[in-house]
Amino acid sequence: MLYKNFNNVVLVLAAGILLFPIFVLAQKPELKGALNEIVKIKGGNIETPASQKDALKKILELTALEIKDLQSQLNKLKDLSADHVKLKNQFLLDLENYLKNLESFNNELSADGAILDPIQNLAAKLKSWRENVYNPAAQNIVTFLLIYREQTILKIADDRYDRISSDVKKLALAKLFETDELEILLNEAAANLKAAHALNDEAKIALTKLLESPEINNVQNSEEKPQLSDVQELVKKSLAKIKVVYQIFFEMSSLVKKLL
């Protein structure tokens, strides 16, 4: 039974951590295709103004869906610090404004009819807006969401660690075999979990500093100010620690199987 518990723990942890990168990195395939279409629009590679208009309309629709998805993810966040409640509310306000931007683009598209040059000009404007306004803001929001998504994964890891720790204690009391190796591995898991929590906390602090800086979009920021890449690197390192934790759990599972 204890061996089975170990295996269940490992499977649950593995499922959580493997799904995490999908949340972070996967871009909707249809949006990717639409972004390719906008490049074609700019280059005049689509044969008719009507097809250009349809492609541009699709991009606007998909961008709106993406924004609404970010709003939904933000609204699901609970138990935030006071600073991060402010950030969350600002993000939601920004996203609402981006939806209004898209509405303006849609109105302009409707007014253009099916004339080649105005549609291509609007496509260029939308591309510039995405690259210079929306995408940088979306990256900040996604990083914010990542930090809190990782906290959920950390909580799962903490709970599983507690269950495994309890099982190791039961094995020690049962005196079926020596548990020294298991206890050493358990201590390693605890150290890595502690480090993962610390890195996640550091990422939260760094993101707050970054987004409160009036020079957030200035590439000439002083070195003291954190960059978005710094925050993402902290999250990456924290995830790496969690990965080590369930690698240890796998190792413990294999060891218990041998000893029983």
Image (cartoon, helix red, strand yellow):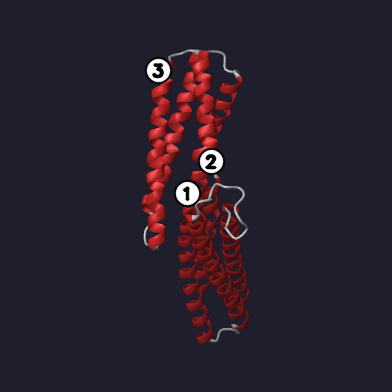
Mark 1 or mark 2, which has the lower sequence index? 2
**Which of these two is toward me, 256 or 9?**
9
The residue labelled by disc 1 is 141
Q: Secondary structure at mark 3?
A: helix
Using the numbered discs, state the Cα–Cα distance from disc 3 to disc 2 in whole angstroms: 31 Å
Whether residues under marks 1 and 3 lie with C-beta atoms below 8 angstroms apart, the answer is no
Using the numbered discs, state the Cα–Cα distance from disc 1 to disc 3 in whole angstroms: 32 Å
Mark 3 or mark 2, which has the lower sequence index? 2
- Left or right of residue 237: residue 87: left
Q: Depth-wise, is mark 3 or mark 2 nearer the camera? A: 3
Mark 1 or mark 3, which has the lower sequence index? 3
Circle 3: residue type: Ala
228 relative to 60, above or below: below
Q: Depth-wise, is mark 1 or mark 3 nearer the camera? A: 3
The residue labelled by disc 3 is 111
Q: Which mark is residue 230?
A: none
